Amino acid sequence: MKTFNFGTDDDEEETREERLVGVSGYHVTNEGETLVAYGLGACVAIALWDTDTGVGALAHTLLPRQDSGQGASSGKYVDAAIQTMLREMVEAGAGYSSIEARLVGGADIFELKALGKGVGRKNAAVAREELDRLDVPIVAESTGGEHGRTVEFDTSTGRVEVTTAHSDEIEVL
Amino acid sequence: MKLNVNALGTFYEMAREGAGLAATRLNSMSEFESRVKVTRLHFTHRSEIRNELDDGNEKVGIRVSLDGELSGSSLLLFDHESARSVVGTLVDDVDEEPTNELATSAIVELCHIMNSGFVDGWADVLQAEIDVSAPEYVIGDTATAFIDEDEFEKMHEELALVFQSQIETTGTEFGFEHYLIPEHDSIARLFETQTEDEGIEYDKLAGFDQMAQHGATRVAENLTRMTNIEMDVDIRRINFISLDAIPETVPNEPLVSVAFSFSGTLGGYLLFLFEPQSANELVAATVGDSPNGGFGAFEQDAIKELSNVMTSGLLDGWANMLDATIDHSTPAYSHDMGAAVVDPLIVGLSEVQEFAFVFDTRIHAVDREFDVDIYAIPDETDLEAALDRLDERRIDESLEHDVEETEFVAEEFDPDLVEEIAAGTFEEVEDL
């Protein structure tokens, strides 16, 4: 069975809680948690972090815009997730002007015409548009390509680690 | 009885929220930080429920009988080690073995509180009274330790409905399952009160599933012939699930996967998932060992073609049953994390639906450690329309036809094709 805490009792630095953010989910925290989204294919993870207060948020989005799918979950749509997380981050003590963004995912795993071209790229593009519209700078991204990604976002430091099934290397954003 | 997708969705959400409440209660009573990993609403042959509980691993928990607007059984089961861990956090200085009287009381109390949250949620949404029996402590490694024969008899034989939720915790290996197994008559009454005229006729879905079972069996037989490895159908069920939750049902490890889209009277996606070792063994058994080692272009073409043959077999059976045309695309290959290969298909379907009927099949080798997971995810609207038009007499005719047919309908591996794959000259037809 999968567990999602990789810490050890004798290393306090490593015991910070890891919280899994599933598909269509999002989480906002001011407690220094590490937020994790597994197996991003066409989905896009949006990591927001306030460099001053350390308030952080991660969304695991599925579709680009609220009018593009079924279901009302805020974390499902790129545009709604960004808006909701920003609002909740400010409520949690973040300063809007010191929030920065990182994007992960948006790959095209399968070449199936029924899926349309560039579904993943479209999710990432809408994330860029929405963040630009809301004046939130994107400081780094790992998007596109043909491989899935897992993202771990340590909100105590702002460090975002990206891993894939195809490499042992960890990409740090 | 008609299964309305909105009603199913409501029931699904109730089960998921109920499991969430149960997890919250576990958190407040123990030192665990737990959450619902996944909630499933299965339609499955009742023998599969028995098989799942009969897995030889000892489980510990409670059984509660439900009566009133919703009757059936609610089972909350920890695996043996998890039960010990839970007892350790609930009671100080006690023998944690679940046979110890204090340990037993602690487990019963905890499970009872978790179950109450679950049942209260159902009662609130249904605005109905549900009577709950006193919890009965259950322990064992066979199905009859948890469900007696009378209860099995009350389930729908071919397509029993089961709500199943897994709870996981941070930091520890933890096994906990909640099963809600309603009596068929009870769930039928419930659907009648929740469902308007629209919906999928239960018996038609059961008939269609029967055909899918035959299709899976034929695929297993065909694989046996192609590989000389005896294969059998391990799991067959229809899973009604939120699209968002599907990635959590797939192993989060690198898998060889082959995807197809299908279209026509019934549209959707078909996904084959192989553990890398299983894929290697299948390819080696079918077209011989790799000329280059590893899982290169030769092996990828071979596993794609193998999946293509299985797809034709499955979808031909469905088309025959529905008296419809179903075309499928050429295979698309990926070797990636399980969740990552499922999510593009979910993105595709999420534009038009929130939930899906997933036809979930596992074919495994009888005497070896490998298997193939097949997920067929039809477009929900298409499925409803196709089953609505389905003449129930056709179910029997299709099954009779299937019995008379001595050869699998899909093509066998063509020796020329094998040569083409080996020579790197294999060309696929135009994608859909």
Image: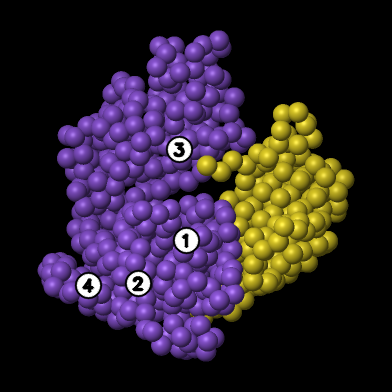
Mark 1: amino acid: Ser
Residue B18 picture quarter: top left
Report how far apart the C-alphas of labels 2 and 3 lie in the structure.
44 Å
Residue B163 picture quarter: top left
Q: Give left or right: position of B396 versus B38.
A: left
Residue in view at x 81 percent, y 62 percent: A140
Report how far apart the C-alphas of labels 4 and 3 lie in the structure.
37 Å
Report how far apart the C-alphas of labels 1 and 4 lie in the structure.
31 Å
Residue under label 4 = B321
Q: Are marks 3 and 1 in contact (CB under 8 Å)?
A: no
Which element is circle 4 on? helix
Mark 4: amino acid: Met
Task: Please name the color used to draw chain A.
Answer: yellow
Q: Quadrant of the C terminus of chain A?
A: bottom right
Which element is circle 2 on? helix
The numbered mark, 1 or 4, whose residue comes first in the sequence reads 1
Residue in view at x 55 percent, y 76 percent: B291
Q: Which chain is purple?
A: B
Mark 3: amino acid: Ala
Q: Nearer the viewer, residue A94 or B373?
A: B373
Q: Give left or right: position of A170 versus B196.
A: right
- The mark closer to the camera, 1 or 4, is 1
Label 2 CA crowd tier, 10 Å (few <14, some 14–19, many 20+): some
Q: Give left or right: position of B27 versus B312.
A: right
Residue under label 3 = B19
Residue under label 2 = B226
Q: Is residue B314 above or below residue B85?
A: below
Residue in view at x 65 percent, y 39 percent: A5
Residue in view at x 61 percent, y 72 percent: A108
